[in-house]
């Protein structure tokens, strides 16, 4: 589906890098060009040395669905769905996690499973797609680059075998939200020809939440991009994307990130 390139053109999900602990590293790896419309990145979270206490890892809301597993124990593999707020995990003293971050709507499209079933959850991948879980459990070389190559080959085979397409009525509404950075009236600004109930049903299937909730996350991600990537953000730029005042902005940001904007930028 050639229109999928519009997702990456309009949306760049951000997860905060690991800053506070010197013995933990995080990096994102760009996928093979054949997968660039489907996967935002592969990511790697690893301890350099054994920690003194379990590591607390914060995941901010980004609208994506992630698959992840420890390279040292591939039999245990997981999936995390759309989150309406930040999540924090205590994950171990030593680990070598690799993850696949699918763009919003892509995992349900490829694996024919409703995103709503995993909203606000992290659960065993075997509960959602046993075949993919079994494939991951057989990965044994513990080498990051070769593991990513095997994952890419598997996902590419799923893409080639896929005979369905995303509902264009949903997709047009989805892209309209991304294009507007989430600042759009979902009851009047989407013009899909669908009634509110039908549109909610499609968003629940492909995204895992309602159009309105997805807008809030897209808007948060736009703000996060502005704060982290712009050297001189425009004063009160948050007013341009629908926040009533600074207090409203800070409360919303903290819901999705877990800390205030000022602390996030330290």
Image: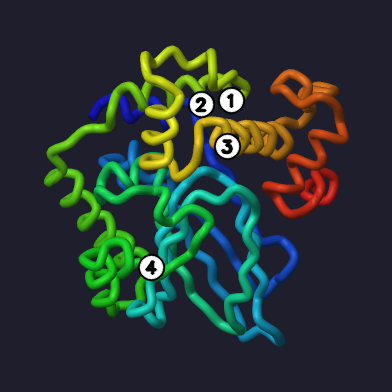
- Tell me the crowding category of disc 2: few under 14, some 14 to 19, or many 20 or more residues within 10 angstroms, Cα based: many
Q: Is residue 174 left or right of residue 20?
A: left
**Which residue is labeled 4 in the image?**
144
Q: Residue drawn 60% across and 38% down?
A: 217
Residue 53, percent from left and from top: 70, 84
* Comparing labels 2 and 3, the label whose residue is closer to the camera: 3
Residue 194, percent from left and from top: 37, 19
**Which residue is labeled 3 in the image?**
213
Comes first in the chain, label 2 or label 4: 4
Q: Is residue 152 left or right of residue 17?
A: left
- Tell me the crowding category of disc 3: few under 14, some 14 to 19, or many 20 or more residues within 10 angstroms, Cα based: some
- Tell me the crowding category of disc 4: few under 14, some 14 to 19, or many 20 or more residues within 10 angstroms, Cα based: few
* Comparing labels 2 and 4, the label whose residue is closer to the camera: 2
Q: Do the CB atoms of the residues marked 1 and 2 lie less than 8 Å apart?
A: yes
Q: Do the CB atoms of the residues marked 2 and 4 lie less than 8 Å apart?
A: no
Q: Which mark is residue 181?
A: 1
Where, by quadrant of the figure, is residue 187 drawn?
A: top right
Along the line of sight, which residue is nearer the eye, 149 or 14? Answer: 14
Please count the marks in the image. 4
Spatial CA span between label 1 and label 2: 5 Å
Q: Which mark is residue 178?
A: 2
Q: Secondary structure at mark 2?
A: helix
* Comparing labels 4 and 1, the label whose residue is closer to the camera: 1
Where, by quadrant of the figure, is residue 202 drawn?
A: top left
Along the line of sight, which residue is nearer the eye, 135 or 183? Answer: 183
Spatial CA span between label 2 and label 3: 13 Å
Spatial CA span between label 3 and label 4: 35 Å
Comes first in the chain, label 2 or label 3: 2
Comes first in the chain, label 3 or label 4: 4
């Amino acid at each position: 589906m050639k229109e999928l390139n519009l997702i990456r053109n309009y949306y760049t999900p951000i997860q905060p890098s690991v800053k506070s602990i010197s013995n933990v590293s995080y990096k994102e790896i760009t996928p093979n060009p054949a997968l660039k419309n489907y996967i935002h990145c592969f990511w790697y979270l690893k301890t350099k040395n054994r920690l003194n206490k379990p590591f607390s890892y914060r995941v901010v809301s980004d609208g994506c669905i992630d698959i992840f597993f420890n390279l040292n124990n591939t039999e245990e593999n997981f999936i995390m769905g759309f989150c309406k707020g930040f999540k924090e995990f205590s994950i171990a003293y030593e680990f070598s996690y690799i993850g696949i971050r699918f763009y919003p709507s892509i995992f349900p499209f490829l694996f024919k499973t409703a995103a709503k079933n995993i909203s606000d959850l992290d659960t065993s991948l075997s509960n959602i797609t046993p075949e993919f879980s079994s494939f991951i459990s057989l990965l044994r070389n513990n080498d990051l680059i070769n593991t990513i190559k095997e994952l890419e080959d598997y996902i590419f085979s799923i893409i080639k075998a896929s005979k369905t397409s995303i509902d264009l009525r949903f997709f047009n509404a989805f892209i309209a939200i991304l294009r507007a950075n989430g600042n759009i009236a979902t009851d009047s600004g989407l013009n899909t020809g669908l009634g509110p109930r039908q549109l909610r049903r499609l968003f629940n299937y492909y995204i895992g939440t309602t159009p309105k909730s997805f807008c809030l996350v897209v808007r948060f991600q736009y703000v996060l991009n502005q704060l982290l990537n712009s050297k001189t953000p425009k004063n009160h730029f948050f007013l341009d994307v629908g926040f009533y005042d600074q207090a409203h902005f800070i409360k919303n940001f903290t819901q999705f990130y877990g800390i205030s904007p000022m602390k996030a930028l330290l």
